[in-house]
Amino acid sequence: MNYAIVEASGRQIWVQLGQFYDLNYINSEPGDTIYLHRVLLLKQNNQIQVGTPCVNSVKIRATILKHLKGRKIIVFKMKPKKNVRSKNGHRQKLTRILIEEVTS
């Protein structure tokens, strides 16, 4: 099983070839190719490369599949004894990417 741990959108994500992942919104069109350069760990053919903090020679090619919205989160604020209530909703914009290639 080959995998990599990359830093993208402020999170560390365990990625595998041929899988798709949802990241925070990336300002590109669907079908565009992006490269993930911040690879923290790479496991290929029972060899593990650990970066300090990144593995410099590795980059991951991914394609943007589509843009979507996350599930709705309800934000409810209330001040007791003052009859002040506010209810808002939030849906995060996301980008779905497909991991295509890992180059060393």
Image: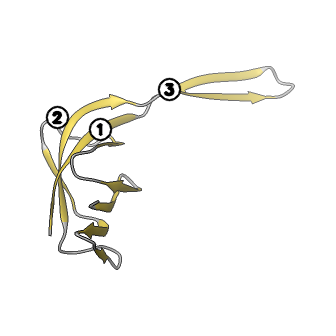
Horizontal arrangement in the rendering, residue 80 relative to residue 47 (left or right): right
Q: CA distance from mark 3 to mark 2?
A: 23 Å
Q: Which residue is mark 2?
A: 30
Q: Which residue is mark 1?
A: 95
The number of numbered badges drawn on the structure is 3
Q: Quadrant of residue 50?
A: bottom left
Q: Label 3 sits on what residue type?
A: Lys
Residue 79, relative to residue 37: is it above or below?
above
Residue 47: % across, % down: 26, 75
Residue at image position (36%, 52%) is 9
Residue 21: % across, % down: 32, 43
Residue at image position (31%, 54%) is 15
The reply to whether the C-beta atoms of the residues labelled 3 and 1 are less than 8 Å apart is: no
Look at the numbered disc 1 and give the secondary structure of its residue.
strand
Q: Quadrant of residue 79?
A: top right
- Mark 1: few, some, or many residues within 10 Å (few <14, many ≥20)? many
Q: CA distance from mark 3 to mark 1?
A: 16 Å
Which of the two discs, 2 and 1, labels the residue nearer the N terminus?
2
Q: Which residue is mark 3?
A: 72
Q: Quadrant of the N terminus?
A: bottom left
Residue 64, relative to residue 47: is it above or below?
above
Residue at image position (26%, 45%) is 19
Q: Nearer the viewer, residue 74 or 104?
A: 104
